[in-house]
Amino acid sequence: MNYKVTFYKDEMEMLTERKANFVNNVKKLTSQVMSKLARECGGNGETSGMAIFNHLKQMHYDREKVWRCGITLDNYKNFKLDNFTNTGKPIPFNFKFVTGGDNESYSRFDARGHVLPKTIMGRKFISEVYIELDFSLCLTDNPKIVVKQLINEIQSTLTHELAHAHDEFMMGELSQYKEKGVSDEDLRYILYWTKPTEIRSHMLEVIQNLNSKKHHSFERTFKNMYKTHQTAEEAGIQHSPKDKENMKTAYSMLKKHNSSIIIDKKSSDALDDVIDRAFHNQCPPLHKKFIHDYHIAFIQQSNPKMKERFYDKLFPNTPTQPLDKLNDFLEGMKSVARALTKLDNEISKHVTMCWRSSSWKRVEMIENAEKTKAAYKEFRNKIWENDSPMKQAFKDYDVKILKNAAKQMIEEFREQHGLMTKAMLKKAAAKDFGK
């Protein structure tokens, strides 16, 4: 039997030429980065995560606002091209840590980043992988839990940016990132996170999320508790025969339960985690549902490679809506956002006029205008919630229901607060005339 074996000179070549290998080895690469980052942080800790955490604590104690470092890996380089001196060199990973204060009731980590790609002689090169971490520490938190949170935040961001760095479709799609004619902040976020390159990076984050849960799960915790005396003592549990039997029973039950969960459910939960992280847990529920479903439809229908790489492995039993239908629905969401922006601008203009008024009723006018402004903010926050009349439109992504529901809600708000449009006034007059 003949086997075809491919050898790679280094990891960079492997990651670039074999995308499947990138998916399988991204954890190894991020681990190498984390290990070297830990050494740059002083290496003060039993693990890389603890060393980085201890460095953040020292920044906290020293009131050090910003810390920067750059690292490179000998096996992670750009291609070498003759007559180009800036090729063939290690790709820098540049980190920036920013202290966010010490008045938090819980530890908080917020990482973001970017890659800087460029093309030379038709080949994509990476000049930088940049990660910025804003953090606030609560030193009474359990260090082990905080370290897990810290490592997951950095690794997820690294995974996302490395996916961009090695996205073979990205260079042809960069022009799509500039969305014109949309001022609604929530919708701009949706348009950004549903870009093809973002979706592919999110899928790799899903894989990273699933891998991390293999190591940090209640199932594994219970297994360690009943198998390892020292682990049980560290958890504050007396390792008696009865305790051991209880832990073993709990482990067996969890293992049976988890094995019954199909991969689609696990992947769906992981995708929700990725979206929550991207939106800092502030994505309106109906927006989140659309982004979630759009991701799955995209990897199934965009091209055969995406389907094989992600959909068939992560969501093989999940039904999807046609991608064209979802794109039409997104256009409908844009029209709703424009109507909301128009209403918002009218209210802001009315508030400004009241403040500038010289009328003897100026104080009363300002109070009423500010009440309307507050009412709009509450209305705006609820329009994309699960109990909104808009919810029906998201069940089957019916753009007609979406527009009609939004129009009715907006008109009811306008009528309630005396902001009726000319068309509404004309309609109301015709109705009164017909009585």
Image: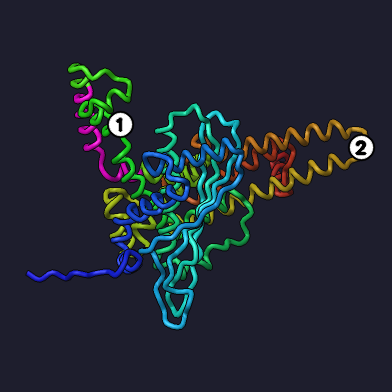
In the rendered image, the residue lying farthest to the bottom is 83
Q: Are marks 1 and 2 in contact (CB under 8 Å)?
A: no
The secondary structure type at the circle numbered 1 is helix
Quick check: 259 above or below 133?
Answer: above
| Residue bearing the label numbered 1 | 218
Of marks 1 and 2, which one's residue comes earlier in the chain?
A: 1
Look at label 1 and name its amino acid. Answer: Phe
The image quadrant of residue 103 is top right
- Point out the frontmost of discs 1 and 2: 1
Look at label 2 and name its amino acid. Answer: Ser
Q: Nearer the viewer, residue 50 or 310?
A: 50
Quick check: 328 above or below 219?
Answer: below
Q: Is residue 411 magenta?
A: no
| Residue bearing the label numbered 2 | 359
Neighbourhood count class around disc 1 (C-alpha, 10 Å): few under 14, some 14–19, many 20 upward: some
- The secondary structure that dominates the magenta segment is helix
The picture places residue 50, in percent across and down from the top left corner, at: 41, 39
The picture places residue 151, in percent across and down from the top left corner, at: 42, 43
Please tell me which residue is depicted at 49% across the width and 63% down the height of the picture: 128
The secondary structure type at the circle numbered 2 is loop
The image quadrant of residue 170 is bottom left
Q: In 3D space, how far apart are the residues under numbered discs 1 and 2 (Cα atoms)?
A: 66 Å
Q: Is residue 321 rendered to the left or right of residue 118?
A: left
Q: Is residue 257 magenta?
A: yes
Magenta span of residues: 247-268
Please tell me which residue is depicted at 25% across the width and 42% down the height of the picture: 262
Q: Quadrant of the C terminus?
A: top right
Quick check: 261 above or below 121?
Answer: above
Q: Quadrant of the N terminus?
A: bottom left
Residue 429 seen: no
Q: Nearer the viewer, residue 387 or 110?
A: 110
